[in-house]
Image: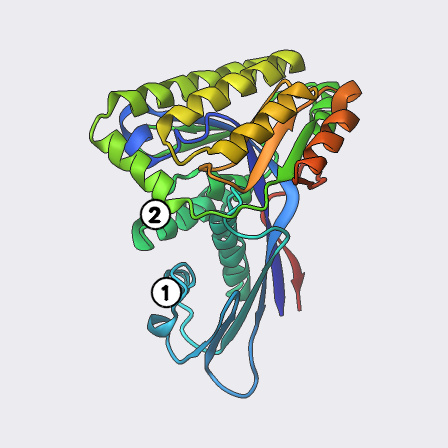
Amino acid sequence: MILSRAPLRIPLGGGGTDLPSYYSKYGGFVLSAAINKYVYICINRPAADDLIRAKYSRYEQVSTPDEVQHDLLRPALKQVNLDRNIEITSMADVPSGTGLGSSGTYLVALLTALHSLKRETIPSHALAEQACHIEINLAGHPVGKHDQYMATFGGITCLEFKEDGQVDVAPLDIPMSTLEELSANVLLFYTGMNRASAEILGQQCQHCENGDSSVLDSLHRTKELGYRIKEALAEGNLEKFGRLLDEHWQNKKKRSSKITDDRIDQWYRIALENGALGGKIMGAGGGGFFMFFCPNHHKSKLREALTAAGLREMRYNFDFEGAKVLVNL
């Protein structure tokens, strides 16, 4: 039996510029933090038969990979040349569709376990790229490369997306005191609203390919803000970071009418009125988790106000391990 895990992530700046439709023309940059909320994959070799069994939100029992309905598991099995006698169960600390990168994280955890089953060692860049290839090219999801790389590497990480598809990965150079303050004052709240990101991201990809100036201008601004957020954190200026988050959110909303709605806007107003300097919805938008930066002396007030408004806080820490095998028996 093999048990693997990969971390979910919270983007701190530049999110959206990792889409191939954007970075292939302009290059992209995302600063992101992995958190200690995970997708887990458990793999077993059944003793009685050669069937493929998959347990997720559904249960599948089939004879060949081609019969698998899960659109990420099917190509993953083919990519690693496993076609029989395998049982795969997935679990996660948060629901899917909440903006924390669960599909890319699922793939990275899955591939980590599958390669381990075959006693194969795969370099981190190759693992992330294999997950990207499966999700973007084989499954056809309108996503970028951010989630797969963060699930692989973990940490608080700078990702540079080159026009040729290469991704440069570097940990953020940040003072330990700043890291501790960042961890204490960046709060996550679940809205209770799950959403499929494909429509929002698909729309953004189409606008990029068509050269829509308003969407492109927003993405150019997003990338610039990502670099500025990196600088603010490297300088230890967390107040500036919080203000830049607000700019990031106001700019992000320009890309699609589906990113926010009246409820989301109301929650954001409540947060600002109760001590938050800035924040944004995680992932594509439309629901899921809200992230806020709130200085220490305002946190209890913010928590009380957002809880009264119907949100639920999720406590977390940063993850610096990335994808790993926990058990190999």
The quadrant of the image that shows the C terminus is bottom right
The total of numbered circles placed on residues is: 2
Residue at 71%, 37% in the rendered image: 307
- Disc ID at residue 37: none
Q: Secondary structure at mark 2?
A: helix
Q: Is residue 151 left or right of residue 76?
A: right
Residue at 54%, 42% in the rendered image: 288
Residue 198 % position (x, y): 37, 46
**Residue furthest toward the bottom?**
48
Residue at 41%, 60% in the rendered image: 76
**Residue furthest toward the left?**
210
Amino acid of disc 2 = Ile
Residue 262 % position (x, y): 49, 32
Gap in angstroms between the C-alphas marked 1 and 2: 15 Å
Q: Is residue 320 visible?
A: no
Q: Which residue is mark 2?
A: 136
- In terms of sequence position, does the residue under pointer 1 or pointer 2 come before the other? 1
Q: Is residue 2 left or right of residue 86?
A: right
Q: Which residue is mark 1?
A: 78
Q: Is residue 146 left or right of residue 211?
A: right
Q: Is residue 48 shown above or below 265?
A: below
Q: Is residue 36 left or right of residue 122?
A: right
Q: Is residue 93 shown above or below 48?
A: above
**Few, some or many residues within 10 Å of mark 2 (<14, 14–19, 20+):** some
